[in-house]
Image (cartoon, rainbow, N blue to C red):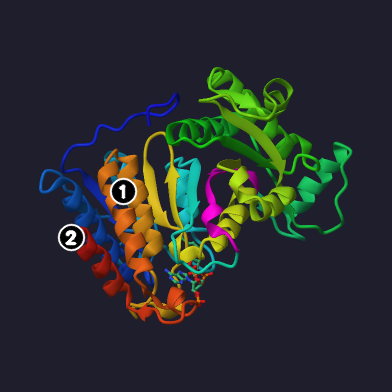
């Protein structure tokens, strides 16, 4: 977190970290994750450092206890303590809050959704060489079609907007539902700033700006243009554009420079499958990033093993990338890997790299030993099928040595 544009955290030895256990399978995966995180911190620091967990409410549990899906107190606690972790939350059906997850991101201005995608050896994959996948998606989290500016077909608002568009010389089909796609320079710049800083910090060779600017010139096209401008303005000495790389360096990046390139979204979907080794950090507007991160997760074993974080300038919330998997709720069955690996990201974010590394190693060794939950066991003949809690216990025991 030393690179330009990123604040360093001043973490005490016994930090209070708020957690939201989540709905559906959330409590199961949270219990396993907490056990593993405590074991990782203990393995790395003995008793000199430890996390002091503090439960905060959101989702169904919050609604039942307080009448609110997302109490103000929860948001304040996360802001006060700067780092938090959460399980998946049910999206309430019919009225009220649109999505608790989206509300958390927007209210705390967690503008970067960060999703590392790496293959853990022996995890079943649909591609031939999953070990070549080592990418980190930085998805813009606050605008684009997710801004929630949408009007239903036949509504007064949709008709008003259609009439207004007509005055600008734009016509839409009669009775169309309408959505607005805002993409701004400021929000693009802060995302790209974080993506480039991350690439420099972690030694990735490139940042790819993913866009569909050939069609949507003033939103997606502008995202790519502003992305290049941000890299040139904030990181003039340690970035180089792909164009310059070929013009001046025969395609070989000078040492210490991150290559800034862009790819049209549809082509990028193809290239990450055919030549994954050519991509490191990928910065994307909200919708593209959402699609791409799940598609990449599939290459390395699916959502059960894909970690994620929502990061802003004031605070960060680490979370499982899958949903509540309600049909398995309370069965102690699903894979806690996504939340555990998100916990490793959290430890790294706090500067507790030793604990993060120990955790990632212990999880990889457990999976490699064939001890896995149902989702991986069904693709891996001969595996030892374990419950969610047993998987957590196996990783924690490995950490304890
Ligand atoms: P989901 O909960 O992600 O589950 C879809 C399927 O993915 C499951 O049936 C299961 O597949 C697999 N899966 C999910 N988590 C797994 C895990 N930990 N281990 C192994 N397999 C796992 O998606 P959904 O059913 O569409 O959504 C359910 C609810 O979650 C909705 O209310 C949705 O809005 C919410 N949601 C929340 C978040 C979030 O909190 N960030 C994200 C997405 C969705 P199999 O059936 O093949 O076993």
Checking the image for residue 74, the label placed there is none
- Whether 356 is among the magenta residues is no
The correct choice, above or below, for 347 with respect to 153 in the image is above
Q: Which residues are magenta?
A: 128-147
The quadrant of the rendering that contains the C terminus is bottom left
Q: Residue 394 at x, y = what percent?
A: 26, 69
Instruction: Say if residue 91 shows up in the picture.
Output: no
* Image side of residue 371 versus residue 256, left or right: left
Along the viewing direction, whichever of 216 and 235 lies nearer the viewer: 235
Q: Residues within 10 Å of mark 2 (few under 14, many from 20)?
A: few
SS at circle 1: helix
- Tell me what residue is drawn at x 81 percent, y 48 percent: 162
* Image side of residue 163 versus residue 288, left or right: right
Give the number of callouts.
2
Q: Earlier in the sequence, mark 1 or mark 2?
A: 1
The residue labelled by disc 1 is: 357
């Amino acid at each position: 977190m030393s690179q330009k544009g990123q604040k360093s955290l001043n973490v005490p030895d016994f930090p209070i970290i708020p957690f939201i256990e989540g709905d559906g399978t959330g409590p199961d995966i949270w219990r396993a994750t907490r056990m593993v995180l405590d074991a990782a911190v203990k393995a790395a620091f003995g008793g000199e450092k430890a996390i002091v967990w503090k439960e905060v409410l959101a989702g169904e549990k919050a609604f039942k206890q307080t009448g609110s899906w997302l109490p103000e107190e929860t948001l304040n606690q996360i802001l006060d303590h700067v780092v938090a972790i959460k399980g998946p939350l049910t999206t309430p059906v019919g009225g009220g809050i649109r999505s608790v997850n989206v509300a958390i991101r927007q209210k705390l201005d967690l503008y970067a959704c960060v999703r590392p995608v790496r293959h853990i050896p022996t995890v079943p994959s649909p591609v031939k060489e999953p070990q070549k996948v080592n990418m980190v998606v930085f998805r813009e989290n606050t605008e684009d079609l997710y801004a929630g500016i949408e009007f239903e077909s036949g509504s007064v608002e949709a008709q008003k907007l259609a009439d207004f568009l007509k005055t600008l010389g734009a016509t839409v089909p009669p009775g169309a539902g309408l959505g607005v796609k805002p993409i701004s320079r400021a929000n693009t710049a802060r995302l790209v700033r974080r993506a480039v800083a991350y690439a420099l910090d972690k030694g990735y060779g490139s940042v790819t700006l993913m866009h569909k600017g050939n069609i949507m010139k003033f939103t997606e096209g502008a995202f790519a243009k502003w992305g290049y401008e941000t890299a040139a303005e904030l990181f003039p000495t340690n970035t180089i554009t792909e164009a310059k790389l070929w013009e001046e360096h025969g395609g070989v990046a000078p040492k210490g420079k991150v290559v800034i390139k862009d790819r049209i979204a549809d082509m990028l979907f193809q290239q990450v499958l055919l030549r994954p080794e050519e991509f490191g950090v990928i910065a994307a507007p909200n919708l593209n990033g959402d699609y791409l991160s799940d598609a990449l997760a599939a290459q390395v074993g699916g959502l059960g093993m894909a970690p994620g974080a929502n990061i802003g300038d004031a605070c960060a919330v680490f979370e499982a990338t899958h949903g509540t998997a309600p049909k398995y709720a309370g069965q102690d069955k699903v894979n806690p890997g996504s939340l555990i690996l998100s916990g490793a990201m959290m430890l790294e974010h706090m500067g507790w790299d030793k604990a993060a590394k120990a955790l990632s190693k212990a999880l990889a060794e457990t999976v490699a030993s064939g001890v896995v939950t149902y989702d991986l066991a069904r693709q891996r003949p001969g595996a030892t099928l374990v419950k969610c809690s047993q998987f957590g216990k196996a990783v924690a025991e490995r950490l304890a040595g």
